[in-house]
Amino acid sequence: MKENLGYPEAHPSFDQIFEAYNEKVESIDEGALKNQIKKFVILGALYYVNVNNEKRYGVHEGNHCHFICEKCGKVKDVFLEEGAINMLTEYSQRRIRSASKIDKVNISFEGECFDCK
Ligand SMILES: [Zn+2]
Ligand SMILES: [Zn+2]
């Protein structure tokens, strides 16, 4: 199913996945698909980023950051060197000390994409 979700770079919303799945794969119950996606997120195969209060899904392929266009909501993957993300994570973990334990990194940059400029 992972492959069938299509256009991973686009970080589709649930509605877009639902539509594409129904069109290209098979008709599926909305609730069933929702559960399926939830499972994939728990397993770590999928992740999501919040854009304008909407969950936008991506196929997990290692730690990366996102660029989010504030105008059109486009999401683009930003791959940094692993070391850069680790350094930020370790630094942040030291800052919050024992109060919390970081186990997921979610870094987003925002701005305007060139299609909107
Ligand atoms: Zn844009
Ligand atoms: Zn991504």
Image: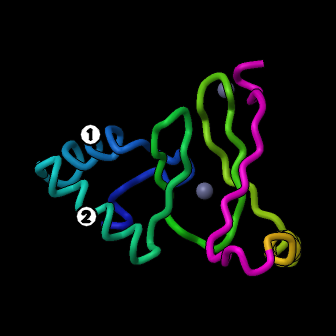
Task: Locate residue 75, reporting x and y percent.
Answer: 62, 42
- Label 1 C-beta lies within 8 Å of the nearest ligand 2 atom: no
Residue 90 falls in which quadrant of the image? bottom right
Residue at the location (68% across, 67% down)?
105
Magenta portion: prevailing SS class: loop
Disc 2 vs disc 1: which is toward the camera?
A: 2
Task: Locate residue 108, reporting x and y percent.
Answer: 72, 49
> Which amino acid lies under the numbered mark 2 shown in the image of this protein?
Gln
Q: In the displayed structure, would residue 38 be above or below residue 67?
A: below
What crowding class fits label 1: few (fewer than 14 Cα within 10 Å), some (14-19), or many (20 or more)? some
Q: In the displayed structure, would residue 3 be above or below residue 21?
A: below
Q: From the image, tell me which residue sits under label 2.
A: 36
Task: Locate residue 56, reporting x and y percent.
Answer: 48, 46
Q: In the displayed structure, would residue 13 be above or below residue 79?
A: above
In the image, taking residue 10 as reference, residue 103 lies left or right, namely: right
> Which amino acid lies under the numbered mark 1 shown in the image of this protein?
Glu
Q: CA distance from mark 2 to mark 1?
A: 15 Å
Disc 2 on helix, strand or loop?
Answer: helix
Residue 99 falls in which quadrant of the image? bottom right
Reading the chain from its start, which is encountered first: label 2 or label 1?
1
Instruction: Determine the residue located farthest toward the top in the rendered image.
Output: 117
Q: Nearer the viewer, residue 19 or 93?
A: 93
Q: Write down the region rendered in magenta.
A: 97-117
Residue at the location (44% across, 72% down)?
45
Residue 38 falls in which quadrant of the image? bottom left
Which dot marks residue 69? none
In the image, taking residue 32 as reference, residue 104 lies left or right, namely: right
Whereabouts is ligand 2, in terms of quadrant? bottom right
Q: From the image, tell me which residue sits under label 1.
A: 19
Q: Indicate yes or no whether the magenta region holds residue 33.
A: no
- Label 2 C-beta lies within 8 Å of the nearest ligand 2 atom: no
Instruction: Determine the residue located farthest toward the front in the rendered image.
Output: 99
